Image (cartoon, rainbow, N blue to C red):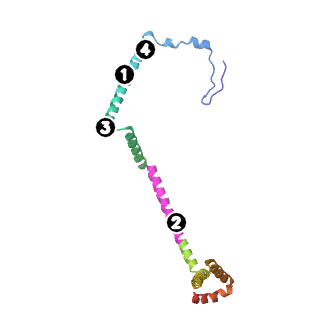
């Protein structure tokens, strides 16, 4: 007798059996002729019952389809009803409720963070706008715009807008940082 390679689920090595041993064992010897006929008869009856049940089931399915057709229930309507039922079942599930609550909490926290961030940015812009350097810059811009308006209005079409803009820029560039504070009050009076 030879042994085969052991498989993953085999607890013990499998041995091959000689063909002579198989022919010596007759499995039909355990049944008598009467028992064999009885089993064949029972098998025939079961096959007939299965055939009858298939016919009855086909008849019932046909009647089922006819009743649905009379009620106007189409496959699309059935699909919608099944989908709605499944959606409802999902929404009432514990996992969905927990996920929904978690996302809601996360959304509220995110909203609070953005609100706090927006408030902080607004406060910083307000502080920056009230700073002396921004005020000085704002005054320079206002004076430059005022000077441009004055020059354009007084020249009455004698000079182009580009010429007035370049002369105002040239005048602003000639101002020195030390003169800015003393001149800013002069500019306020002239602007």
Q: CA–CA distance between discs 2 and 4?
A: 81 Å
Residue tagged 4 = 40
Mark closer to the chain start, 2 or 4: 4
Query: Which type of secondary structure does the marked residue at label 4 adopt?
Result: helix
| Residue on which the image places disc 1 | 52
Q: Which mark's residue is nearer the viewer, 4 or 3?
A: 3
Q: Looking at the image, is mark 1 or mark 4 earlier in the sequence?
A: 4
Quarter of the image with the C terminus is: bottom right
Question: Which residue appears at 47% of the width and 53% of the height?
Answer: 99
Q: Residues within 10 Å of mark 2 (few under 14, many from 20)?
A: few
Q: Nearer the viewer, mark 3 or mark 2?
A: 3
Q: Is residue 27 above or below residue 165?
A: above
Question: Taking 187 as reference, is 53 above or below it?
Answer: above
Q: Residue at x 46, y 58 (%)?
A: 104
Q: Name the residue beneath numbered marker 3.
A: 71
| Spatial separation of the CA atoms under disc 4 and disc 3 | 47 Å
Q: Quadrant of the N terminus?
A: top right
| Disc 2 secondary structure class | helix
Q: Which residues are magenta?
A: 92-120
Q: How many residues crowd mark 1 within 10 Å: few (<14), some (14–19), many (20+)?
A: few
Looking at marks 3 and 2 on the same chain, the residue that comes earlier in the sequence is marked by: 3
Of residue 68 and residue 161, the one placed in the foreground of this image is: 161
> Which mark's residue is nearer the viewer, 1 or 4?
1
Which circle's residue, 3 or 1, is located before the other in the chain?
Answer: 1
Q: Are marks 2 and 4 in contact (CB under 8 Å)?
A: no
């Amino acid at each position: 007798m030879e042994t085969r390679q052991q498989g993953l689920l085999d607890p013990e090595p499998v041995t091959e059996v000689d063909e002579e041993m198989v022919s010596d064992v007759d499995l039909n010897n355990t049944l008598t002729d009467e028992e064999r006929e009885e089993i064949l008869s029972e098998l025939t009856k079961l096959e007939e019952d299965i055939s009858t049940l298939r016919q009855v089931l086909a008849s019932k399915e046909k009647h089922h389809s006819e009743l649905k057709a009379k009620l106007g229930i189409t496959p699309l309507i059935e699909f919608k009803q099944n989908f709605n039922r499944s959606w409802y079942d999902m929404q009432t599930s514990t996992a969905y409720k927990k996920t929904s609550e978690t996302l809601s909490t996360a959304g509220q926290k995110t909203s609070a963070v953005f609100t706090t961030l927006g408030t902080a940015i607004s406060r910083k812009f307000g502080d920056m706008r009230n700073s002396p350097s921004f005020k000085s810059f704002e005054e320079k811009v206002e004076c430059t715009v005022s000077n441009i308006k004055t020059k354009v209005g007084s020249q009455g079409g004698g000079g182009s807008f580009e010429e007035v803009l370049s002369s105002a820029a040239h005048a602003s560039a000639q101002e020195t940082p030390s003169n800015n504070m003393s001149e800013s009050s002069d500019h306020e009076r002239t602007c």
